Image (spheres, rainbow, N blue to C red):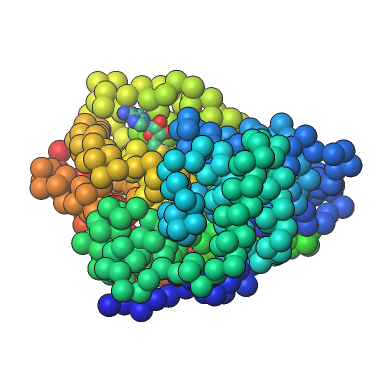
């Protein structure tokens, strides 16, 4: 039996607290100090907010659970309306993402104290109890008595006396019996990991089959870390060294990415998407793993490139930057409304070599001539299980059958676009998941059906850090704990004969 690691009881959860590296850091009101006030994420407000941070979090969580809303979109929409101070916006963000991330652990604890069972509660009451227990267990800056009184006041406002009494009773009882807030160590391993790190049991069991127990536990632990902030420098406008200098002199704490030559890790400095550097196109906000995709494509100036599933255009733009905006990139996506997103990126970054088009990638072979592209990127739609840190809802919204469904689409997409590559060209297949069925098994199947394709060496494109990663079929599988970046699979294939 593996030993209990952090997060299985309130005490170790408190150790988690002491790291104080919460998601809310992104909303810190310590904006970059800069003589150019446009770069300061200054949101001190004088008026009384229309809604409290906790009420907003309860509304977002209830909409996610009841209406299947996307947490990020719902949260952003409500934050815009609410005009909270930056600290309160940070708290609301922390409560929403933290509560979703720790959902089944919170429910496991609550189940012992809610007489009629958590499932029978009204969704808003369930959300209120969950955010309260999340604060008690995982956040150190809010005293327990404040958590209880805030919850009781909110229950009075949103419900009635009976509900506020029940909320008061449940929370006080939990605080009095903290020793009961433990995950028993005698549980079968998969169940223990599932409860301790809040992942669905089917997912944990699936990963144990693929990666073994220790790696699965490391994946689940990493999935609960707040994601790092990183930006990709626009190489047509500046260099990483110059950008880092400018950012540092404005008060941001930055580090060069060890994964991508274009990446900068931003340890503190406010919301990068609100800076004038971002608006002026000097950089884009992008995860480090994702930056490795264009690295693998290695497009050259003057080449013709096909990006099959391109929206919102992050990797398209990166490839255009690598080409110094010389050549042509056809950036295709099936959704007409997403074409705008690609065009917005291109315009902000000053990139003219991108042609954004709409259509099903399954039909690209009817629209373009065989062997007409030097490079093809298939950044496929996938289950997204590599980006749980950023989108914790994925844990609860996906099922094993989603993985089977999406892999048959991926396989068909690969088969249809393969003839479009010139002999000697490079086809990159990438996903933001860690599922073998969508990754190495997918590429193995493709190579067995297409003798005209070969896997390429990974070592000549991946940075030194990446070279130790598991490389199979010309691809690297990046797990979220490897470099504390998103889980990604990137395979690099070449066409040898016509
Ligand atoms: C992983 S995302 C691509 C992310 C993008 N490469 C980037 O870096 O910004 C997958 C995209 O595939 C698109 N998509 C899904 N099915 C498609 C299809 N059959 N044909 C073309 N695009 C598709 C989705 O709309 C989604 O935008």
Residue toward you, 144 or 48: 144
Specify the quadrant that holds the N terminus: bottom left
- Quadrant position of residue 125: top right
Question: Is residue 484 toward the left or the right of residue 278 in the image?
Answer: left
- Tell me where residue 5 appears, x and y as whole percent: 43, 75
Question: Is residue 351 toward the left or the right of residue 465 in the image?
Answer: right
Vertical position of residue 70 compared to residue 272: above or below: above
Count the labels in the image: 0
Question: Is residue 302 toward the left or the right of residue 273 in the image?
Answer: left
List the single residue furthest toward the right: 46
Q: Residue at x 34, y 66 (%)?
A: 192
Residue toward you, 28 or 371: 28
Q: Residue at x 36, y 22 (%)?
A: 359
Q: Residue 369, can we see it?
A: no
Q: Residue at x 39, y 53 (%)?
A: 386
Image quarter where ligand 1 lies: top left
- Tell me where residue 338 appears, x and y as whole percent: 48, 26
Q: Residue at x 30, y 58 (%)?
A: 204
Vertical position of residue 484 compared to residue 333: above or below: below
Residue toward you, 245 or 362: 362
Specify the quadrant that holds the C terminus: top left
Vertical position of residue 96 compared to residue 190: above or below: above
- Tell me where residue 96 appears, x and y as whole percent: 58, 47
Q: Residue 66, can we see it?
A: yes
Residue toward you, 290 or 353: 290
- Tell me where residue 191 appears, x and y as whole percent: 31, 63
């Amino acid at each position: 039996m593996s030993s209990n690691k952090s997060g299985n009881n309130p005490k170790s959860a408190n150790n988690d607290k002491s790291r104080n590296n919460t998601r809310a850091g992104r909303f810190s009101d310590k904006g970059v100090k800069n003589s150019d006030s446009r770069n300061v994420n200054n949101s001190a407000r004088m008026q009384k907010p229309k809604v409290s941070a906790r009420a907003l979090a309860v509304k977002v969580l209830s909409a996610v659970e009841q209406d299947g809303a996307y947490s990020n979109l719902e949260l952003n929409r409500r934050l815009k309306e609410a005009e909270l101070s930056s600290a309160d916006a940070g708290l609301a963000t922390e409560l929403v993402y933290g509560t979703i991330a720790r959902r089944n652990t919170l429910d496991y604890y609550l189940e012992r104290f809610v007489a009629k069972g958590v499932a029978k509660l009204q969704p808003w009451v369930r959300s209120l109890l969950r955010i309260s227990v999340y604060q008690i267990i995982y956040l150190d800056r809010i005293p327990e008595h404040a958590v209880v009184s805030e919850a009781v006041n909110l229950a009075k406002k949103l419900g009635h006396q009976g509900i506020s009494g029940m909320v008061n009773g449940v929370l006080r009882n939990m605080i009095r019996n903290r020793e009961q807030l433990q995950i028993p160590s005698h549980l079968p391993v998969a169940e223990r990991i599932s409860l301790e790190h809040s992942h669905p049991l089917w997912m944990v069991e699936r990963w144990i089959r693929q990666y073994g127990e220790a790696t699965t536990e490391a994946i689940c632990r990493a999935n609960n870390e707040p994601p790092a902030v990183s930006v990709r420098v626009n190489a047509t406008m500046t260099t990483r060294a110059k950008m880092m200098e400018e950012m540092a002199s404005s008060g941001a704490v930055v580090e060069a990415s060890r994964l991508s030559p274009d990446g900068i890790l931003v340890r503190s400095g406010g919301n990068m998407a609100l800076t004038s550097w971002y608006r002026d196109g000097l950089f884009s906000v992008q995860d480090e793993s994702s930056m490795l995709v264009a690295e693998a494509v290695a497009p050259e100036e003057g080449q013709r490139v096909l990006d099959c599933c391109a929206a919102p255009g992050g990797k398209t733009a990166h490839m255009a930057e690598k080409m110094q905006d010389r050549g042509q990139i056809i950036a295709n996506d099936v959704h007409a409304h997403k074409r705008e997103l690609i065009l917005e990126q291109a315009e902000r970054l000053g990139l003219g070599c991108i042609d954004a088009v709409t259509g099903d990638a399954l039909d690209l072979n009817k629209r373009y001539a065989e062997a007409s592209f030097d490079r093809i990127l298939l950044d496929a739609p996938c289950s997204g299980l590599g980006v749980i840190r950023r989108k914790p809802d994925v844990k609860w919204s996906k099922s094993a059958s989603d993985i089977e469904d999406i892999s048959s689409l991926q396989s068909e997409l690969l088969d249809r676009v393969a003839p479009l590559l010139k002999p000697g060209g490079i086809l990159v297949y990438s996903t933001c998941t860690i599922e073998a069925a969508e990754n190495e098994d997918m590429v193995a199947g493709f190579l067995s059906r297409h003798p005209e394709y070969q896997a390429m060496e990974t070592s000549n494109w991946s940075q030194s850090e990446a070279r130790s990663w598991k490389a199979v079929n010309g691809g690297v599988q990046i797990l979220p704990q490897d470099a504390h970046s998103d889980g990604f699979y990137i395979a690099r294939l070449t066409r040898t004969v016509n």
